[in-house]
Image (cartoon, rainbow, N blue to C red):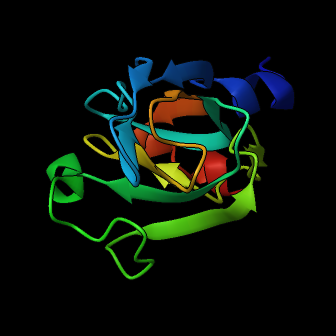
Amino acid sequence: MTSAIEVAVQGVKPVRFRSLPVKATGTPFAVVTASTPESGYVWSVLSLRGSIATAGNASTNWYRTSDPSVFGPGVNLTNETLPNFFDRVQNASANTDFIYTKGELILNTGEYIVGVFFGAGVTNAWISITGEAIEVPAEMVGKLLL
């Protein structure tokens, strides 16, 4: 007989993801995560951290996108009306953890997290993004919403 707990956790896998550390060449500066859910899977992001090696303050806008190229040169990256804006920390240390409840921030196959860092502390700083998520097969997405 299968227990209710075994059924509840079947197919659920913890995932850690990150970006490669990059040196900002100016402000604002966009950093894209290096990972996305594999085909047939979805993630519920539980935590995000934008790490910036600087003594100065910075603001961070967070986006979910399937096309990171929209964050390229010539785009006003401090504009919260860009597609899929979902969170912001303003004028604080960018080394801030964002915590999300299960099912609050879902990533589908091909979607990435983009952190846009801006402010006096960004130029020439090393920046990276790390996070943790729960992964389930796409047909089990209901487990992330209950």
x and y, in percent, of residue 26 in the image? 36, 44
The answer to which quarter of the image holds residue 121 is top right
Quarter in which the C terminus is drawn: bottom right
The answer to which quarter of the image holds residue 34 is top left
The answer to which quarter of the image holds residue 25 is top left
Quarter in which the N terminus is drawn: top right
x and y, in percent, of residue 15 in the image? 58, 20
Residue at 55% across, 56% down: 119
x and y, in percent, of residue 38 in the image? 31, 26
x and y, in percent, of residue 3 in the image? 84, 23
Could you tell whether 99 is left or right of 79 in the image? right
Vertical arrangement, residue 72 with respect to residue 137, above or below:
below
Vertical arrangement, residue 91 with respect to residue 27, above or below:
below
Residue farthest bottom in this picture: 81
Q: Nearer the viewer, residue 4 or 77?
A: 77
Could you tell whether 124 is left or right of 50 in the image? left
**Residue 84 can be seen, yes or no:** yes
Residue at 23% across, 48% down: 68
Q: Nearer the viewer, residue 43 or 100?
A: 100
Q: Nearer the viewer, residue 63 or 141?
A: 63
Residue at 75% across, 46% down: 93
- The number of callouts visible is 0
Could you tell whether 74 is left or right of 92 in the image? left
